[in-house]
Image: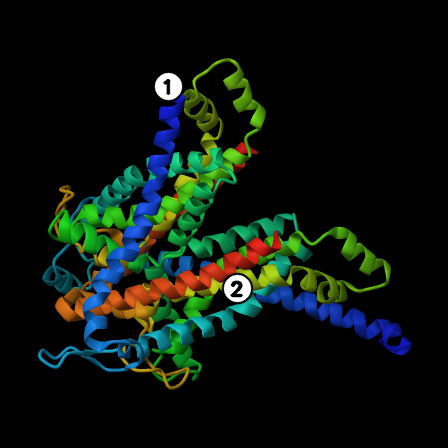
Amino acid sequence: MNSDKITKIVLFSVSFIILIIAGGMVFSLVGGAIPSFKTFGLGFITSSQWDPTEGKENYGALPFIAGTLITSFAALIISFPLSFATSLFLGEYFRNTRVAKVLGTMVDLLAGIPSIVYGLWGFYVLRPFLIDIGFENQGFGVFTSSLVLAIMIIPYATSLSNEIISMVPNDLKEAAYSLGSTRYEVIRHVTIPAARSGIFAGYILAFGRALGETMAVTMLIGNANRIPDSLFSTGNTMASVIANQFGEADGLKLSALISIGLLLFLITGIVNGIGKLIIKKMS
Amino acid sequence: MKSITEIDNIGSRTKKDRIFLGLVVLLSVVTVSPIVLIIFKLITKGYKQLNFGFLVEKMPDTMQAMTAVANNELIPGGIANAILGTLLMVALASVIAIPVGIISGVYLYENQGKWMANLTRSVSDILQGVPSIVLGLISYLWVVKHITNGFSALAGSFALGIMMLPMIVRSTEETLKMIPQTLKEAGLALGIPYWRVLFGILIPTGFSGLMTGILLAVSRVIGETAPLMLTALGSSVINTNISKPTSAIPLVIWEFYNDPNMVDLIWSSSLLLMIMVLAFNLTAKQVAASRK
């Protein structure tokens, strides 16, 4: 066998590791989830019980699924005006200027801050501030978590839409200018419609990020195993319940937590898949 | 259709234009303000504690911390156990992820358009989207339960390694795509073996690009807490045995946060963590910029 062939085989087999890891991941999550799905059936997804008392253990994931979707969705709504304005700043108004470079670097750095530092900042700075201005009376819960999550996902939402906005052909914009449009009108009637699906995809990917965030949410959501009944109520997300309850888990409880991990894996996979599909369709 | 008067109303249109610009600038400033506020907070609250001893001494116990706080002194000791743990686990994660990542990136580049490569690329993208806590669960199920039979640095490194892998794969492929095809063809035309063209010509040419990807991946995993909670667990002593529980900077921040006596240490630890993240991040940017 010649060396070219060996090289090709090595390249192929090493990259095959990625498929093995991903396949093994699904296999292990499903395997670990089986005991709890066997015990509770599909009721595991629709029940809101969480009772670890020995002998009458009963686990349901609904409060955590709801908590995850609500906090992530609220985070998306809060972050939208901020990241949209930032992508217009970077990709349209101040494109290729020094100020855009500085601002862009700062936005990138937001993505670099560890989740636990966001959690600390949310707990020691944002929470007291929200209480002081009378917006919140306890400071824990869905709203505070979503606010911090919103900041955390801004870089992800911004980077794609910024890129797409700066790629809108100049001819289109110049045509509108030559008809006497103001800059706002060009953005409103040319840039945004042309970049719409890319911007949308960016927000879907950012939403996927928010779904899996763990530490910051764990520190701020209040860790109550119930379905949040308002924006200011406490709750738990799928990621935060795994982080919180894992330490003392074995047997059926461990299986329940792995099942939640499996559901989280599936939900983020679907959301990211939709985002990627939109991007693929565009290009 | 807009009426003539509406289009003619240039005054109000310009006004709208100005207001919108003002709004964009204002919201953009609001967007980046957290980074300034967070770093400012970490520095003002953390700099006093961040001295030499903090870097080289091991963690104080909760009694020592309580006495110090009661006497209004700085808490003695440091987080050397966590710093070493972080360095150990990140290094080990890199050893796992970098070779596999680079070789897979080369594979994807060399097999553009083939279905197996497309599948691998998509799967790698999916891996990149998997929440880090789920990677922690996986490492727990594989390494903690079956390899080290207990919480360990190796399990932590494995979780961090799987996190780094897709980032390195992607950056390798993207970097190689930017290298002119002629370079590779010239090498092959000279009769240089295929593997030497790949690893002796392409990889060195794209070195700074690969380096950027690796540094960014490191800066991304160095602050990860959740997967380590399920795998490395933490330890109050300095540990270099990869099959034993090991601490890490994010893990001690979590411990301090939950211990009222030690809570003063969260800021200096976070400041140190932030400095490390920024160092990797900015070095990556520097390497990327020097290429152009």
Q: Tell me which label, 1 or 2, sits earlier in the chain.
A: 1
Residue at mark 1: A2
Question: Considering the numbered disc 2 on the image, is that residue within a helix, a strand or a loop?
Answer: helix
At x 48%, y 41%, the residue is B285
Chain of residue at mark 2: A
Q: In this view, does A19 lie to the left or right of B66?
A: right
Where residue B90 appears, as percent x and y from the top left, is: 28, 44
The answer to the question of whether label 1 and label 2 lie on touching residues, with beta carbons closer than 8 A, is no
At x 80%, y 75%, the residue is B12
Q: How many marks?
A: 2
Chain of residue at mark 1: A
At x 63%, y 65%, the residue is B24
The amino acid on which the numbered mark 2 sits, given as a three-letter code, is Tyr
Seen from the viewer's position, the closer of residues A71 and B124 is: B124
Residue at mark 2: A203
Q: Residues within 10 Å of mark 1 (few under 14, many from 20)?
A: few
Q: Residue A142 sits in which quadrant? A: bottom left
At x 43%, y 18%, the residue is B193
